[in-house]
Amino acid sequence: MPREAEPSLNERAFVVQALQEGLRLDGRAFDQFRGLDLKFGDHYGVADVTLGKTRVLANVSAEVTAPYIDRPFDGIFTITTELSPMASPAFEVNRPTETEVLLSRLLEKTVRRSNALDTESLCLIAGQKCWSIRVDLHVLSHDGNLIDGSCLAVVAALRHFRRPDTSIEGETLTVYTPAEREPVPLSWLHSPFCITFSFYGEEGEIMLLDATLLEEQLRVSSCIISLNKHGEICQIAKLGGTPVEAVSLIQCASAALTKGKELSTLLDQKLAEDSKRRDKGGLLAELSAENER
Amino acid sequence: MPLDTSTYDLALLRVDGRRWNELRRLDGQIRTQAAADGSSYLEMGNTKVMCVVSGPSEDKRRGQTSASTATGSNAADVAVSVVVAGFSSVDRKKRGRGDKRIQELQTTISKALASNLHTHLYPRSTISISLNVLSQDGSLLAALINASTLALIDAGIPMTDYLVACTAGSTSSYAANDDRADPLVDLNNQEEQELPFLTMATLGATDKVAVLVCESRVQVSRLEGMMAAAADACKGVRDFLDQVIREKGHKMVTEGTIEKGASMAIEIDA
Amino acid sequence: MTVTTEPEALLSYLQKADGSATFSYAGYTVIGAVNGPIEVQRRDELPEEAAVDVIVRPAAGVGGTRERHLESLIQSTLRQIILVNNFPRTLIQVVLQVTVAPENDYANAKVAQANLNLPILPALLQTAVLSLLSAALPLRATLASTALAILPEHGDRRIISSPTGRQIEQSQSFHVFAFTSHDELILAESEGSFSMKEWDDALAAAQGTCYPPTTTGDTDVLMDDDKLVGSDLKHFTRSTMEQKTASDLYWK
């Protein structure tokens, strides 16, 4: 399979020297994100995140299934990340690359293990029926900072998602179709966000946010911090690379908190806008909106 | 909750009777395998790992199972493979080769070592490190990193400094917003199950952090305390590793230049 | 539940791929990306022509045998229109990512196994062609594809083009046709029970959708764009390309 083109020596020297002089190739400040756009689809549970030239699409779906035998009171929640050759020909189908493994582990730790989604609320009949919530993450275009974008897309899609309403009468479980009853949102506990820091220089003294693919290829080390707006760290991953002073990592954590709060506000605002758009004039408008499609 | 550590407040003693800044019993040996270029055996409490280093050797086509650093051909490749024995923990769960958790461990160790080793001295070659986990009782990543450092020193591969790792936790879980939370170091499995913790690897006795992995929910404000405790513990681990190496070196000097592997008569009392 | 009647397309929409397009029609939205000609793996290498690799990915769930089947249909179709002989020992990779499929409000779908079927085939083919055009790969011809359902109605039969999910459920038979821009039939897939006569009628109707019956071959260059947009898929492809070229060369 074709390999990702590596930056040439000149390019490498140019970018690194520019960073040492306090400049980024695209003229951003070191702690500035690229243009971030979040769009929701016509269906519930579709979120499309554009971060500069990076583009990620998350799609949430739900179905009723049997729970795992060892966890009869929990629903099933999975996040699938399969990078297709669409993002880069270097990604091969059915052969996960390191990027893919790390991305899926990170999302798993950030969203699933931090209990962002209350899996107990997905239980319908203990030990027999539960909801299985599945997030499919599609990377459409990869130009760096896949992790922050993907995490935002996954969290946004899950918060946007509505699952079919259910009711239990005696022993019978009824799952209502969207036409019968308005679908209900998932029971959501907190919204974690990933912030990736890239380090440059001999001792990792230069710190960048939202690195592009070129910058990512040249970094000496990186640190990914996931946290929610309450200041709870869900995960930190500085997986090797050039050693960095402990103090600057603590600075990273506080910078991540500020950025996480910004992302959280943005997401709340977008969700509110979307629900307003859907709810224009109540139920009637919703029907006509469907007709337009 | 698997157990209750709330008794900590009474006597400031942990479940296994340690104080907050005490490490578990450390036991390390180097040159345990005669055939390997470098090898080590390390116990951190009941976490027991074995490490074998071969190389630097000619670049082979890399296998799928090991994580390696793609640094191009100008520096040696550090290929790490971690095998967790089925009998290493209470639940005998069979972990496949494609296990993402293991792959992440491999990548972490590989990248951390690659930045510490002088890989540029061995272009177009591979340093392969295989780690075997014999028994698990918390601080797994830390033990793996420490064992690889020992084995790499045995293999005589130049490095900047010891890469040493240790875990640090914090009493009271994330739910309780307890200001009196104390940091703890070198957590065992019981404590890892219950308390928020992080694994930190530093370069020798400095404050430079090569690896920082946290997988549990914890307040940002606690991070600093935990990292400081971990950094102190890392210094302790470094002193221990240094002692192991020096003892071995001393032994080799006093016994004369011994043939490699002849020093196999070591006390494997585990 | 209604669907868009007007097809919509956006060309060169992903920055990283050599060519890309997004196409929405009949409730489906598909994003296509083409990389090629690129290096081919040894085992897939063909000594005298380019290997064409098609990957179809559903919006939710993992692909299964149905996706593999669609991939093989598209692969053999595209191989015919791409000038594969121009690029021996290379690979042309077409990735088709479904992003929106029509949802049925009256039923709760199972998702663990994605369920892409024949109805999505026209959208996939159109996307693939637009992406190939965007990647500027030399083609023998473009193609246009449409889906038809034959519904029983008052004892008689009615042919519906671009049917909705509901109509497909009620239909007796379902057909997908694709034609090249030289008016040749390149793909015909049918399911259900039908007579030869019905198939002929469907073919004629499909030809009418893909091409206006009055024009053939080369004269379509002279046709008025506005008149036929939407009803004529070949023209749609053409006008999309023209718009894209016009906007790209705006500076001239």
Image (tube, coloured by chain):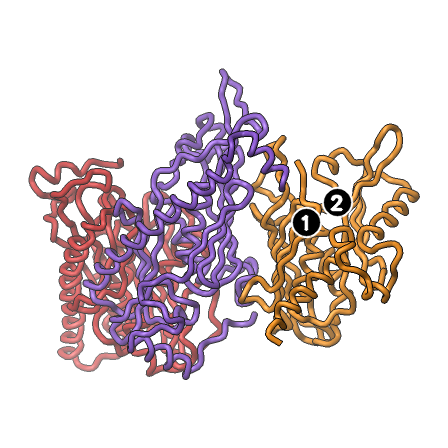
Chain colours: A purple, B red, C orange
- In the image, A234 versus B170, the foreground residue is A234
Q: Secondary structure at mark 1?
A: strand
Tell me which numbered mark, 2 or 1, is placed earlier along the sequence: 1
Could you say where residue C125 lies in the image, as x and y percent from the top left?
71, 56
Residue B33 appears anywhere in the view: no
Farthest residue, direction right:
C197
The residue wearing badge 2 is C162
Which amino acid is tagged 1?
Tyr
**Residue at the image position 68 percent from the left and 54 percent from the top:** C124
Q: Are marks 2 and 1 in contact (CB under 8 Å)?
A: yes
Density class for disc 1 (Cα within 10 Å; few <14, some 14-19, many ≥20) is: many
Q: Residue furthest left?
A: B11
> In the picture, residue C19 is in which quadrant?
bottom right
State whether discs 2 and 1 lie on one chain. yes
Q: Position of residue B139 (x, y in %)?
A: 25, 53
Chain letter of the residue carrying label 1: C
Q: Which mark identifies residue B46?
A: none
**Residue C26: x percent and y percent?**
69, 46
The residue carrying mark 1 is: C25
Amino acid carrying label 2: it is Ser
Q: Quadrant of the rendered structure where residue B239 is? A: bottom left
Seen as rendered, the residue at the extreme top is A170
Q: Is residue C85 above or below residue C101?
A: below
- Say if B179 sits above or below B140 in the image: above
Instruction: Specify the quadrant that holds the N terminus of chain C.
Output: top right
The residue nearer to you, when weighing C7 against C166, is C7
Q: Quadrant of residue B120?
A: bottom left
